Amino acid sequence: MLTDVFSESGFVAWSVSSALDMDALLARETIDLVVLDVMLPGEDGLSICRRLRAASTIPIIMVTARGEHVDRIVGLEIGADDYVPKPFNSRELVARIRALLRRVQSGHETRRLRASPLAFAGWQIEPTMRQLQDPKGVRVAMTSVEFDLLLAFCRNPGRVLSREQLLELVHGGVAGPVERSIDVHVSRIRQKIEPDPRDPTLIKTVRLGGYLFTPAVEEA
């Protein structure tokens, strides 16, 4: 019944009745999400969920007649992304599937963008390799703190960032010498990227606010 509902909702759906059949299906097909019943012959759903999660990040929604809170907690703790007790409305399950797939896709996109090279005003910053290139393609040496600060600016263009926010973005809010010397590090970054460090146009100081990264930033 659920396979028919999923197909009518635009999904390509397979139904299997055991862990062995599931393993065979996963080996030959690219699966985006698993709807997993707890009560199965042989290996039960909780064991399957634990095993799947140990090997992959595939989204898992568990469905079961066990509606007690403790069962839901166990299911979620071993790696299920959502837990739907029986009886349930099939349309609600479809809605939960769509919501989970959106969250997963959004997470993939966010990670992809955070790892992608970014370009601004002819410059290019490469997060993975931690490199900065000037408009002529020449690599510019930077300290670790300088790079992290510039990357934080590039990921928040057009937004006024206070020193506390910069500290949170760069070092998770851990106070220390970096917090007291944010201005010094920004000054050093300006010396490297500004056309005229005495009159900065890329990193603006906002009175009583912090700093504003002015150039447009795009994925390189």
Image (cartoon, helix red, strand yellow):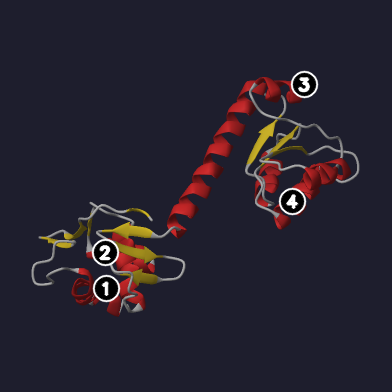
User: From what the image shows, is residue 130 above or below residue 48?
Assistant: below
- Classify the position of the N terminus by image quarter: top right
Confirm or deny contact between disc 2 and disc 4 (CB under 8 A): no
Residue under label 4: 52
Q: Which mark is residue 1?
A: 3
Residue under label 2: 164
Q: Earlier in the sequence, mark 2 or mark 4?
A: 4
Confirm or deny contact between disc 4 and disc 3 (CB under 8 A): no
Residue at 66% x, 38% y: name it.
83
Residue at 78% x, 39% y: name it.
38
Q: CA distance from mark 1 to mark 2?
A: 7 Å
How many numbered discs? 4
Q: Visible in this render: residue 29?
A: yes
The quarter holding residue 190 reads bottom left
Q: Is residue 88 left or right of residue 24?
A: left
Q: Earlier in the sequence, mark 1 or mark 2?
A: 2
Q: Amino acid at mark 1?
A: Glu
